[in-house]
């Protein structure tokens, strides 16, 4: 029940790809002994997904290479406005540490010389759009969502893992609640579903008792082997 804000790490034999820079990023990186970040994918512009961005600086200091980060148009505008000093060199002492790129529909990485595809799909998140990520057609990571568009349903069916937003019990205009999350899980039929973005209202043990057998609540440090 002691949870930090949402970030996720895709770890391959070649690189570490971070999804979102939560305000708790430093604590998360230290706890899990993450020694390199090669690329970063941003789901959307909200503070709980972006405000840990400064903690990527140490990886630049170690490698002396700008880290490629990927964001959609609106998130890019927000990042450049709020953290301009990260993307633009103002002096030799404070060089640009990150390079901002447009988030593509498909991103490739390698694991043991095999291509791994990361597909980004736009979903509704209240009044803004958010991006979710499907890794190797096996796992979907949807941390912030209020609506998945019907045209994209085909990408979410019969996955091995579905990691999905589940804020609390009551209705929320920007997030799935427990009822909606379970309905979506039932529709898409993943082998296993994991509830994330859990608010303090949701107790881990209580939640575990009331969800179906193929559903579990997430916890910090949860690792999935694909």
Image: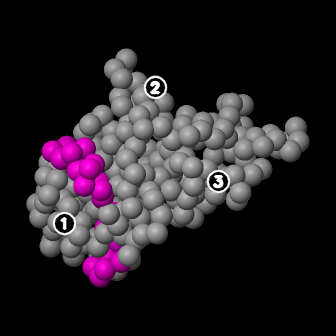
Which class describes the residues within 10 Å of circle 1: few (<14), some (14-19), or many (20+)?
some
Question: Which residue corresponds to mark 2?
Answer: 14
Question: Magenta residues, as a range?
Answer: 148-172
Task: Reply above or below: 8 against 64.
Answer: below
Which class describes the residues within 10 Å of circle 2: few (<14), some (14-19), or many (20+)?
few
Task: Reply above or below: 90 against 125.
Answer: above
Q: Is residue 56 visible?
A: yes
Disc 1 is placed on an element classified as helix
The numbered mark, 2 or 1, whose residue comes first in the sequence reads 2
Residue depicted at x 72% and y 44%:
87
CA gap between label 2 and label 1 equals: 35 Å
Q: Nearer the viewer, residue 73 or 118?
A: 73
Residue depicted at x 27% and y 79%:
169
Residue 67: x %, y % from top left: 63, 36
The numbered mark, 1 or 3, whose residue comes first in the sequence reads 3
Task: Reply above or below: 134 against 175.
Answer: above
Quarter holding the N terminus?
Answer: bottom left
Residue depicted at x 23% and y 70%:
180
Q: Is residue 50 left or right of residue 124?
A: right
Instruction: Verify whether residue 154 appears in magenta.
Output: yes
Instruction: Verify whether residue 34 appears in magenta.
Output: no
Question: Which residue corresponds to mark 3?
Answer: 77
Residue depicted at x 30% and y 56%:
149
Q: Is residue 25 visible?
A: no
């Amino acid at each position: 029940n002691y949870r930090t804000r949402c970030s996720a790490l895709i770890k391959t034999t070649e690189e570490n790809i971070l999804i979102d820079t939560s305000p708790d990023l430093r604590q998360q990186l230290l706890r899990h002994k993450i020694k390199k970040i090669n690329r970063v994918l941003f789901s959307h512009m909200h503070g709980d997904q972006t405000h840990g961005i400064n903690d990527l600086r140490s990886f630049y200091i170690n490698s002396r290479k700008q880290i490629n980060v990927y964001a959609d148009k609106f998130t890019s505008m927000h990042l450049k406005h709020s953290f301009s000093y990260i993307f633009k060199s103002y002096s030799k002492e404070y060089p640009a540490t990150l390079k901002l790129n447009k988030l593509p529909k498909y991103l490739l990485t390698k694991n043991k010389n095999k291509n791994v595809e990361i597909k980004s799909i736009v979903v509704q998140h209240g009044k803004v759009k958010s991006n979710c990520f499907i890794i190797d057609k096996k796992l979907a990571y949807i941390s912030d969502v209020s609506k998945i568009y019907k045209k994209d349903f085909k990408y979410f069916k019969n996955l091995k893992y579905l990691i999905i937003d589940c804020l609390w019990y009551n209705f929320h205009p920007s997030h799935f609640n427990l009822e909606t999350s379970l309905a979506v899980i039932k529709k898409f039929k993943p082998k296993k579903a994991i509830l994330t973005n859990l608010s303090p209202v949701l107790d881990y043990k209580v939640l575990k008792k009331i969800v179906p057998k193929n559903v579990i609540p997430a916890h910090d440090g949860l690792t999935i082997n694909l």
